[in-house]
Amino acid sequence: MVRLVLMLGLLLIVAASVSYWNARNAADTAYDRSLLSSARAIAERLFDANGQLQVDVPYIALDNFAYDITGRLYYQVLDLQGAPISGYEDLPPPPDGAAMTADYPALARFYDAEYRGTGVRVVSLLQPVSGGELQGMAEIRVAETLNAREGMARNLLQRSLVNLSVLSVSALLLAYLTVNAALGPLRRVKDEVANRRSDNLSPIGTDGLQREIIPLVEAINHLTGRLRENFERQRDFNAEAAHELRTPLAALKARIEFGLRSAEPEDWRQALRDAEVSTNRTIALANRLLSMARIERGARAVADGSAEYVVMQPLVQDVAMAMVPLAHERGIELALEVAQPFTVWGEPTLLQELLGNLIDNALAHTPPGGQIVLRLTSPACLEVEDTGRGIPEAERNRVFERFYRHASDGSGLGLAIVGEICRAHRAEISLEQGALSGLRVRVRFPEGGPLG
């Protein structure tokens, strides 16, 4: 509304200037016509008196040249030689180069001048004289002070300003009432959101809202729906993590208690060995859970645009070299094939986590003497293929669920972490039967720059 007031104020100033200019033109036109009429009335009373040009100014013309309400009129009559024969002798002549008017059928020139310290508007009318000894042009000048014109222009301007002011105030009032009525439903939405509890993510109702506001409310509902899904996933993850941690911890506690109840040193050593195995599994599970937390932060970084361009070939080489000792220990060959290098817009730590989990999963399911091949192909595709036993086709969609195990060993989080990282980078992941008789995991990254 403030901007609208400022805009209307500016328009009012412009309109006032235009109105004054139009009013002044209208006043000039009206008063110029009156000046020319007075000059013609005097020209009609010119006569020859014994070879001398004389004028008998009519009483009505003299009455017109008397003082009026807003200004004063002056006249002058010049004979054929340019000598004054009647009226005021010192009226200013037309300036050099003053053109004849084309607005009226007369030999007349209009011009502005200064007379007796005030501005005047003057008409100079040339009147042909013929008859007897007189042959030539007489000149009649009629001048008028500008007070009347300016008064008329001011009156017209005042009327225009009154009309424009009334129109502007009416427009502002109408705009205020319209905007106030239009924002009513939006205020209702604002109050509903402000008064909600922090855990209330139910959709906002759209009944009674204008169609211009409905898309905004639907966008808010879409956002709250995504937040609700994220919270539900987080809640389910916490419950599942608590359950998964409770089981190995309970087993660890049972093994320790069994060793404490026994008096045989061999039983103690066996209990410690079992406790070590359970502890390692628990530590591995805790590390996976921490990885999931890191993925959440990394995914937000990617979504916020704070990622970077990552050249995949050196990253894959570094991760593969770090995994070579473990593969060698298990008697598995780890190879890298680079058919087409490419760059990914993403978070380097997450991409290392993705590749590390894929290799670790392949190592866990590839028998000794087997082979794991890493490939970089076009367009922007990463493949990890092994000679293991693979995953049945019916289970391939479920292995990305948290804590789902297609085999008895493992934490059930490796491929779930891979799936989360792929979602964060908007990459497509698929599981296929590989040419090496095992499983082939294919990850296709989006081409181009930052994720929008």
Image (cartoon, grey):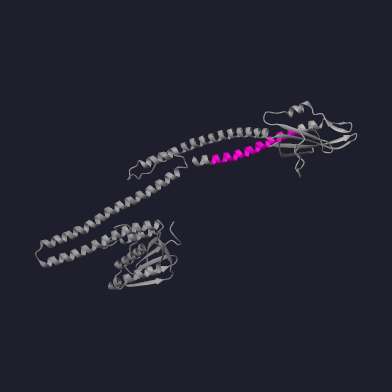
Image coords of residue 262 (percent x, y): 10, 63
Q: Is residue 304 visible?
A: yes
Quadrant assignment, res 217 = top left
Q: Is residue 400 left or right of residue 4?
A: left
Image coords of residue 222 (percent x, y): 40, 48
Of residues 428 and 25, the one drawn nearer to the viewer in this rendering = 25
Of residues 63 and 204, the one drawn nearer to the viewer in this rendering = 63
Q: Which residues are magenta?
A: 7-36
Which residue lies most toward the left here?
263
Q: Is residue 408 visible?
A: no
Image coords of residue 366 (percent x, y): 30, 69
Image coords of residue 452 (percent x, y): 44, 56
Of residues 58 and 8, the one drawn nearer to the viewer in this rendering = 58
9 magenta-colored: yes
Residue 309 vertical placement versus 118 (above, below): below
Q: Residue at x 79, y 37 (%)?
A: 125
134 magenta-colored: no
Q: Is residue 366 left or right of residue 156?
A: left
Quadrant assignment, res 16 = top right
